[in-house]
Image (spheres, grey):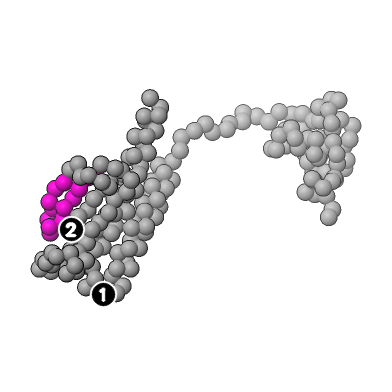
Amino acid sequence: MDLLQTILALLLTLGILVTVHEAGHFFLARYFGVRVLRFSLGMGPVLWRRQGAGGTEFALSLLPIGGYVKMLEGEADGIASAPGQRAFSETHPAAPIAIALVGPVANLLLAVLVYWVLFVSGVTGLVPYVKALERRGPRPGGPGAGRRRPGNPELECRQRGFGPTPWGVGADHLYVGRGPGPLDPRAPH
């Protein structure tokens, strides 16, 4: 069951990415007045199709490996332009570049939107909570027993009864057991 759920989640995610990508191409082509012949999600044999406004055919194809937006290329297609629409090759030279680039930009904007929604919705989780600090010094017989050096701020805090270092047990060995050395950030260089 996990494999089937993973495959369905992958298909849904890729479907959303492909739809947003191709929609970027589609809407900018329509903005520039380019006639769009087909907006297809998937490749291969068509499973479902519908004729939309402006003569665009919307299709859902068998293989979910991408999609495409087919635009009128010119007289080579053998299709006449509708009033107010023109071929892809008849637009301003910057229009084809913009139409080609808007697909990846649409995916980038989708990623920013998704991360923004995750950021503002927050993440629920356990929050660390400390009731009180334990009053203790170096463990008797531990690596720091009997090796107190004046001038070591970490040891002075421990001598006054504050709790362990925030780095955990490993810091006891680095700072107390070995003293200043290459791993000690307070060691002279």
Amino acid at circle 2: Leu
- Classify mark 1: residues with Cα within 10 Å, few (<14), some (14-19) or many (20+): few
Identify the residue at image location x=13%, y=53%.
52
The relative height of residue 92 versus residue 158 in the rendered view (above or below) is: below
Q: Nearer the viewer, residue 171 or 88?
A: 88
Q: Does the magenta stretch include residue 68?
A: no
Residue that extends furthest to the bottom in the rendered view of this protein: 92
Give the side of residue 55 with respect to residue 120, left or right.
left
Q: Nearer the viewer, residue 174 or 155?
A: 174
The relative height of residue 96 versus residue 49 in the rendered view (above or below) is: below
Q: What stretch is highlighted in magenta?
A: 49-61
Circle 2 residue: 37
Q: Quadrant of residue 127?
A: top right
- Classify mark 2: residues with Cα within 10 Å, few (<14), some (14-19) or many (20+): some
Q: Is residue 58 magenta?
A: yes
For the C terminus, the image quarter is bottom right
Q: At numbered mark 2, what does the secondary structure look like: helix, strand or loop? A: strand
The mark tally for this picture is 2
Magenta region's main secondary structure? strand
Residue 3: horizontal and vertical position, in percent? 40, 29
Residue 90: horizontal and vertical position, in percent? 21, 73
Res 162 visible: no
Identify the residue at image location x=40%, y=52%.
112
Amino acid at circle 1: His
Residue 20: horizontal and vertical position, in percent? 30, 51
Q: In which quarter of the image is residue 180?
A: top right
Q: How far apart are marks 2 and 1 (CA)?
A: 19 Å
Identify the residue at image location x=32%, y=67%.
98
Q: Nearer the viewer, residue 67 or 119?
A: 67
Circle 1 residue: 92
Q: Quadrant of residue 95?
A: bottom left
